[in-house]
Image (cartoon, helix red, strand yellow):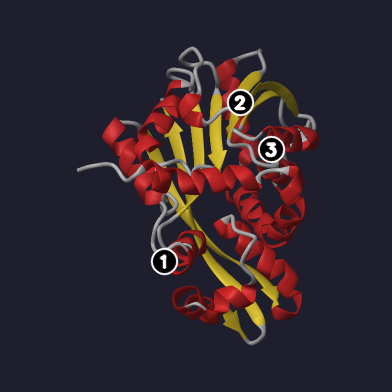
Amino acid sequence: MTNPPMAETSDTFARSCDHWSEKNRSEMEAFYALASVDYRHLAEAVDWREWLKDRQRDAGTRSLNLLDVACGSGKFPAALMAYGGVDTTSVEPIRYALLDPSGFSIEEARSVLQPPFAAAEEFEITLQELSCPPGTFDIVWATHALYAIPKVELRAGLERFVNAMAKGTGAGFIAHASDQAHYLKFYRHYLDDFKAAQGEPYSSSEEITNVLNEMGASFETRDITYTNGAPDSERHHVEGYLQRCVFDDTISLDDMLTKPKTGAYLQTCLESGVWKFQQRVSLIFIST
């Protein structure tokens, strides 16, 4: 089986990197008007205080070393502090390393870190470029972060992810939408309607767990479901959210509604004057 042409496999990744920049801040903020709920659900789905305490017991008296893969704008640690009860009264200080191919994202994530999270190393690279001694980090996590990795590089990225985890005591966490979640369905419709079915779909949680199985990794998975939504009166936020879902701010919500696949899909998302985007997200816990 031959690999897809590079222009197709890299298009999704290239556009995602371009949109993590200062010039697209307004689009990013419109996206998070709806998408911040993603991270609140993650923060409330697990007793993170106890989970981090367990990791600290494994580490002993030294501080935990944590790597946030494709850290974005730091929404996950911010949600842990806001909704997960993670603070200095419950969790020991954690050295928080940031990895992202976008320097803008690293700066954004670093700016929101507060104790017990203390900014540590920075890696302005992709996951698949990560080169560190095996077992460097007690914790490696990636939350809504791996969608745009080219599929031909997904195994290499996950191998780097697992390799960075401490042997025997390392803990990994990946939060990633499933094949039937809004993010993946809408992006496939977008590629069909606006890119002549060219370009690479987002990776799904099912693809990630398949690769982890092929690698012989030890992991457990459970799913959560919820809805991103907003009233139709907030169309500006809905439009910005949908543009960011596909990393394309050149198309309006009206454009999306006129196309056969995105239009038909979006019609199903508007109920009684409220936009509802159904999500199904896999919580993948990896151990070494």
The residue wearing badge 3 is 105
Which numbered disc covers residue 66? 2
Q: Secondary structure at mark 2?
A: strand
Q: State the CA–CA distance, disc 3 to disc 2.
A: 17 Å
Percent x, y for residue 201? 42, 54
**Image side of residue 160 versus residue 62, left or right:** left
Q: Residues within 10 Å of mark 1 (few under 14, many from 20)?
A: some
Judge whether residue 10 can be spotted in this image.
yes
Q: Residue at x 23, y 42 (%)?
A: 2
Q: Residues within 10 Å of mark 2 (few under 14, many from 20)?
A: many
SS type, badge 3: helix
Tell me where residue 18 appears, x and y as whole percent.
Answer: 62, 44
Please report whichever mark, 2 or 1, sits nearer to the chain's N-terminal start: 2
What residue lies at 61% left-to-right and 65% top-to-bottom? 242
Q: Which mark is residue 274?
A: none
Residue at image coords 72%, 51%: 24
Discs 3/1, front: 1
- Give the residue displayed 65% in from the left and 41% down from the top: 72
Q: Is residue 149 above or below residue 137?
A: below
Q: Amino acid at mark 3?
A: Ser
Q: Position of residue 97 (x, y in %)?
A: 65, 25
